[in-house]
Image: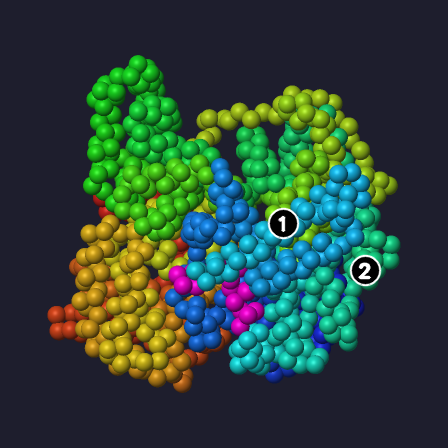
Amino acid sequence: MITKKFKEEYAKLNPKQKEVVDAIEGPVMVVAGPGTGKTTILTLRIANILLKTDTPPSGILALTFTEAGAKAMRVKLRKIIGNRALEVPIHTFHGFAASVIAEFQDHFAHLSKSKQITDIETEQLLRNILNEKKFNKLRPIGDPDFYIAKIIGAISDAKQEAWTPEILKSFAQDEIERIKNSPDSISTRGKSKGGLKAEALTHIKKAERTILFADVYENYEKKKTEERKIDFDDLIFELLQALRKDELLLQSLQEKFLYILLDEHQDTNDAQNLIVKTIADFFETPNLFVVGDEKQAIYRFQGASIENFLNFQKTWDQMKIISLVDNYRSHQYILDTSFKMIEQNYKEGEHFDLRTKLKSGTKEVANPLDLVIAPNLETEETYLVKNLQKILKESKDSSIAIIVRKNSEVAKIFSILEANDIPAKAERGANIFSHPVGALYFSLLDFFRDPGNIEALAQTLVSGLWDLDFAKQTRLIKLIKSGKMAEIEKEIPILFKIQKKLTDTAPLEFLYLVADLSGFTHMVICSPIGTEVWRGIISLAEDLTKTEKIEDPKILIEALLAYKKSAERRTIKINTGQALSQITIMTAHSSKGLEFDYVFLPYAVEESWIKKNHNSYFVLPKEKKMDDNIRDERRLFYVGLTRAKKHVSISFHNEDNLGKVMTPLRFIDELDQNFIKKIKLEKTNKVNIKRNLTKIEAKQNQEKIEYAKQVLLEKGLSVTALNHFMDCPNKFFYKSILKIPEAPNANSEKGNAMHEAMSNIWQSKNKKIKQIEKIIIDTVNEYFRYSLLPLLEKETVLEELVADAPIVALALVEHFKEAGKVSTESWVENYFSYQSSIKNSEKIEIKLHGKLDVIREQENKIFIYDYKTRKSLSLNAIKGETANGDDNYFRQLIFYKILLEESSKFKNKFIEPALIFIKPDSNGRCPIVSLPIENTDTERVKNEITNLIKNVWSGDFLTNICDDKDCQYCGYRKLLT
């Protein structure tokens, strides 16, 4: 049935776009430049397949390069075909690999119970391998870890290109023979005449090092498998290897996916490309649809290969090629100017069919692009600020992008705009070691490692810790300088109380203790960014504790400070600023696929954009040359230029802050100068970066509101977050939005371990009592090997779970024999819409999501099981209708029912949720409590969700407190007011 929305959208297409949407059979390649409506044709083509064939939504596989791309495609498809869009597998390559491994677990038995390897575990594993004598050449004296980062990068490259250790070793050996036997390698002059040239000897040495690297790579894979670990690149590599060796798996996927659509094909690497080709190879003329644009290939550093895009034509010579030339984003001056530049990437006659000149289909007035030439950096930044202020004053709804090459430039411009009261949003990296919050915490640890480190102590005093006023801070600084530590102890007794805790506190517990008692926790909760950095520190500490099995806080502090010294960087991604701001600051890579009315490209100098070739330490089958780098950067600059709809402003400075002469970016001269307006600036004073202190509190509140909106819009809402909100708005903010790190507790660890055990039982073919008992005991033992609970607590919990295992097995044996299709730990999501009563307000769509322990399908019934590691509650207690009741459990099941009811897969089916209490009661039972859910119950929870959204968008959640006078989260709020 053709939907009204499909007809409307199809009618808007131009003839070439209609040709693409209608070409649903056979291999089709679409060359789609920027602004040609790529996402629209992809989604309409999926809709057209569903409308014109009997293919189920699950029979169409859509692959895209980023999570943002996958989300945009699904949102657009949902507007056309409704909730059936949620059944179409739309994935990134990693997401697709993960879904196949999860669905066909018996084909990936060697990956069962595998966990993601951390950076620290990777480094330690390689360090252990390199300690073997035969790898001495990869452990240079004075810096034995020199090659570790290089090896990690090379292993990642190898997996992205589908190179096994055998392939690399064979290639390196062939290279040695080729060099030795090549006449070009023989010196014809001087003392080396008749011997090999220095360049040839260097290449041979590199090839010999590569043979060693191949052995390290092989050992790394073996040891990783033994330890049941996988790395980021393994998902795709494992899927590719399975498709090559497992005929049944391959056939299953080939028969399942009747249509394959691949977005951003120019950005796929060899491994990803081979997966697509292998699955598509089922039919002589597969229904394969690829979209891409060679001019926008910007991910070569991740193994992407332009040749993949070009070679598809050779694989299927009957492939239909359609070029989209109508651009609906930019005016003609922008298109012509950028096209003249990108043409420099090609030799005469090369790839002629991919070099289509775009034609503007917009009604925008074509104005020349600005080229701003500033005498110095300060002048360039001042000009940028004034221009932004002018646009914001003249237009309240124009979108503006500031696109730069480096993450550090994102952070810099954000600070400049913030200082000038210009609202903006940005995603930027923060180094947890150098960020002020991180640096302060590491100063704290430095002091507790060495109480004689008075510099570290002084830093904590002047930074506002220990709840000291300014007068007391200055007096204590003088006491520190004079070495009067006894006086310090009198003034800050808590400092030395913490010091004594070093001997009788668990490692992670000590880190939280330091944060709480010093005032650090209070400090970080004032800022979303501070909280993100704190989470990054705790994440690192957890990794170190697990990897090195640390049980002493002093050893953990030593390990953290040593890692800080050796790693230099540990970056986390932080979204900052106002989510709905007109201005977005981003790198050129992040701008891909987006569009804005105005685009600013500051810092257009060689020093920012052009990287020198990195030394290559190994000989790999694909070597990247400097010329490739220039072409990549030219494509990246082209991407930045073509984000603009109305206007582009490019700027550069002749000198930096230190008077160093800068070089204008070479691509500027390659632009079509007929459409460039040059603006030469006179030197001005440095842009104002002073803060208006009277506005700080208001800004912090606004920052928190915008951050909460951003989290909900991007991450969605879980029932846990809703329960937090219903308990206390401040609990919701600190736990579900800021996600303040909290030390693991016995109840949560017990729950995690038993949930893992339940999942493993469902996946086991043998569900007899003894086998169930064994799975529980094995799972919890394995889980608590890596638990971060204090040792005594860990032993107590483990002892309890092992003792309960035979009782639980006996109580639940019939439960695990229930018939039907069972899915464990299923991720389900749907959208919830809210429209404010305020006139002209925008409709807000929030993604609801949940991870359901078990979904069991039996005929027309759907059973939801949620396991609870506590003794059972009565029905009234679960509904919150008794003195000690807790309706959070009931709300959780209602929420899950809403999720499933809105899914077209489960629509019109009878849904029965149940809680299963897996802590045996005094009679050895693990009761299964089914709860009937009425329409009034679902309406109540939907109203609660609406209320949460209204509170966040209005900011009211920041001013409300709950009824519990001892609530720690309301306590945080009171501290800040």
Residue at 68%, 40% in the rendered image: 612
The answer to whether 328 is drawn above or below residue 701 in the figure is below
Give 179 or 956, whichever is nearer the viewer.
179
Q: Quadrant of residue 771?
A: bottom left
**Mark 2 or 1, closer to the camera:** 1
Kindly identify the amino acid type of the residue bearing the numbered disc 2: His
Badge 2 element: loop
- Residue nearest the observer in this picture, 299 or 307: 307
Q: Which mark is residue 206?
A: 1
Q: Which label is found at residue 225?
A: none
* Furthest residue toward left: 922
Label 2 vs 1, first from the N-terminus: 1
| Quarter containing the N terminus | bottom right
Q: CA distance from mark 2 to mark 1?
A: 34 Å
> Residue under circle 2?
351
Colouring used for the render:
rainbow
Q: Residue 176: x percent and y percent?
A: 67, 55
Residue 130: x %, y % from top left: 47, 50
Segment colored magenta: 225-242
